[in-house]
Amino acid sequence: MEYIMRRRCDSAASVPQLTNSPTLIVMVGLPARGKTYISKKLSRYLNWIGVPTKVFNLGQYRREAVQSYKNFEFFRPDNEEAMQIRRACATNALKDVVIYFSKDHGQVAVFDATNTTRERRISIVSFSKEKGYKVFFVESICDDPDIIAQNITEVKVSSPDYVNCDKDEAQADFLKRIECYKQSYVPLDDEKDRHLSYIKIFNVGSRYLVNRVQDHIQSRIVYYLMNIHVTPRSIFLSRHGESELNLLGRIGGDSGLSPRGHKYATALGGFIKGQHIKDLKVWTSHMKRTIQTAEHLGIPYEQWKALNEIDAGVCEELTYEDIQENHPEEFALRDQDKYRYRYPNGESYEDLVHRLEPVIMELERQENVLVVCHQAVMRCLLAYLLDKTSDELPYLKCPLHTVLKLTPVAYGCRVEHICLNIEAVNTHRERPGNVDVTRDPEEALKTIPEHF
Amino acid sequence: MMRGCSRSKSTQNLDRTVCMTNCPTLIVTVGLPARGKTYISKKLTRYLNWIGVPTREFNVGQYRRECLKIYKSFEFFRPDNEEGLKIRQQCASAALNDVRQYLADGGQVAVFDATNTTRERRETITVFAEQNGFKVFFVESVCEDPEVIAENIVQVKLGSPDYTNCNTEEAMEDFKKRIKCYENSYETLDEVLDRHLSYIKIMDVGRRYLVNQVQDHIQSRIVYYLMNIHITPRSIYLCRHGESDLNVKGCIGGDSGLSPRGKEFAKYLRQFIQSQEISDLKVWTSQMKRTIQTAEAVSVPYEQWKALNEIDAGVCEEMMYEEIQQHYPLEFAMRDQDKYRYRYPKGESYEDLVQRLEPVIMELERQENVLVICHQAVMRCLLAYFLDKTAEELPYLKCPLHTVLKLTPVAYGCKVESIYLNVDAVNTHRERPEVGIHTYIHTYIHTYIHTYIHTCMHTLI
């Protein structure tokens, strides 16, 4: 009963209750200015911190309506037929936004389109006013031809639109597409648009203009957008080496490394050296096992309390068998909703995400980073980087003695799993079939991993 | 335990932060008089110190007052007043010298609070910073709203030492002429000419911001903070939950409900809130029973923040101070040694609490009228932020039960009203004891030796 009550008015999410109106984020900018990149990244971040967000990409709607793309002529401003189709697509997208907010409990919708004319933006603003949505514009302005060319290569050339073209054809056509928009492009204006809420991003973040931030969520969005960058880099995630408590199948605690754990740490050092990473930052938690692991690397490291493992409260240092014996009901409740379940006197995954938000923000600011952490923590970070839902998050596989190398590419992240070939216990517990509080102990213990 | 982080200067950055601090940062304000530069400088300094970044502001006006002793009139500031210019130049140099000293001596951020309205002056500062290995970040405040400026002048200028012998009209007139002296030579930070500088331009008291070339973590945090503060008049009410059952027993921590007197307090709190007739009051509680029960009685919608939960006393949870003394005497003494940084085994320190409360402070800055129903240690941290208390003072701030603190920002600080709601409660405040760890060890050794000798003698006999 207690647990359910705790959830009711829960502001465990990083944002205080957003009881107010939904927010419509409207992207603005010529093609190849990073609008979709920003839309997807922002949506991933907001969902991770617990704000239901969805991207509505107009290009998708157009592709569904038109089926096969011929060439840039579709986008010519004097192509009446195409104009009609494009207008219809925009209307449909906004209809879906309404459904998302009213029926699907969405909180933020990102309308990802060029929205380059004042006329179009005015119609979106009236639409929002009518429905009671707040509007926040995100305009990306870039006139660096190198960045634009790079964009086109990374994401346009491989788009469904150009599936039958070679690289150069695609590039040339896309450049002509951009020209079609340039003539009618009216950027957000300091004077005329002074009543709108927006952020203007110049040249991939060297400069920002922020106007009339209305509320908390817009302030968080601005802060996030001002911290992300597109400089190539890699993020390495690893757990500490196998610990003494791991060997005994006990959760939590603050034990040191087992002999195999030390071996792993040495291997990790070798691996890192072999990667020849420029300016690598190493982060650990405040717990012995991550610090001992980092010590083997021979590189300066920084300790973050925020990276400490999830606090299992009354279950700290117990085995799963102990938990089943002493707290069978709690054990079942956890299996029912592993993301939101909070150990008595401990934390939930949801709490962890909140705790880790400053780590994510700093990860965004940084370049090459190795994070030596813990199972639950690594699951949370991974879920952010790979856009996993809160249902998937607590069951992500993060085995000991394996390094994950994440490299941002196009709109997502490439993941390489590098197992360093040092044996370790398995600490992953799958969701058992029976999650009822009345289940038999055997059913509860079916999926627990082996231990000494 | 900061091994491996040789770059970090102090042990302060324990929990959270990345070593924000390779080189020190020099924040330079820019703007005409009465644009809020000193307000921003002081507030920013207070915030940075609270989150553990040693910061100090250097107000050139102060230096001028010390140098000049008596302020006659705006004529001092006339651009053609050669002597005046010389003195002002000297003052700026003296201030920069002190900045250099401060940043070499353990300071992390220095806020150079002056008009710095010419490109030439800013160039000098940039060169100074470069020579000394400081990063520079400009904070410009631009405002043309005559009402805002007039209000500024009334709030902070008329009461300035410069105008102790003038009446309101004279002071206002003189100050306006003072502003005029700067206007002609004012060169605002320019998008093109200054595109290589790192800065934030705040326009119209926060309606609009231009942010350029943010270099690092601390600048990013500063920008975020500056973009969340406002000057709309409002009040923040802080109080603890009503007296709890564990309070009555003399136990710390735990998650008990309200005692009968605590429930009484909650009723009085409701009456008090109603009598204040506050527009759009937001009410925040922690996720612990005693604050929630208190808010329930106030009968206003409230939001629960886990971040507002009381400090986790780890192994000492739900113990009385006597029990802690008995079971963990060494820990108990160590806590008294350094109550701010001391972390209960398996628990938290005040320093951890501050870290945890930072998002709460950020949101408090964004909000207007708020009532925060929280706990003793938490309230001490929040109070320390608003009243600019040091880490040494913080853990000993008095936050008694059944007392509401009403904080109203005024001029450069905060007016505090303490309202005791006349319901008796236990006192949970423990002063810093005279006995330190040295005395503890002395007593321990003394007792040990005495017992040993006693035992030996008995054995011999």
Image (cartoon, coloured by chain):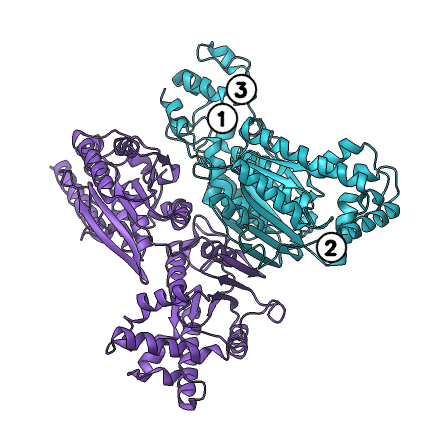
Residue at x 55%, y 48% (from the top left corner): A224
The hue used for chain B is purple
Position of the N terminus of chain A by quadrant: top left
Amino acid beneath label 1 = Leu
Whichever of callouts 2 and 3 sits on the residue coming sooner in the sequence is 2
Marks 3 and 1, Cα distance to the nearest angstrom?
13 Å
In the displayed structure, does residue A205 sit left or right of residue B230? Answer: right
Dot 2: within a 10 Å radius of its alpha carbon, few (fewer than 14), some, or many (20 or more) residues?
Answer: some
Residue B55 appears in the rendering? no
User: Which chain is mark 3 on?
Assistant: A
| Residue A110 rendering spot, x and y as whole percentages | 61, 40
Residue A248 - label:
1
Dot 1: within a 10 Å radius of its alpha carbon, few (fewer than 14), some, or many (20 or more) residues?
Answer: some
Whichever of callouts 2 and 1 sits on the residue coming sooner in the sequence is 2
Question: In this view of the protein, which residue sits in the foreground, B205 or A355?
Answer: B205
Element type where label 2 sits in the image:
helix
Q: Which residue is mark 3?
A: A448
User: Which chain is mark 1 on?
Assistant: A
Report the mark closest to the observer, 2 or 1: 2
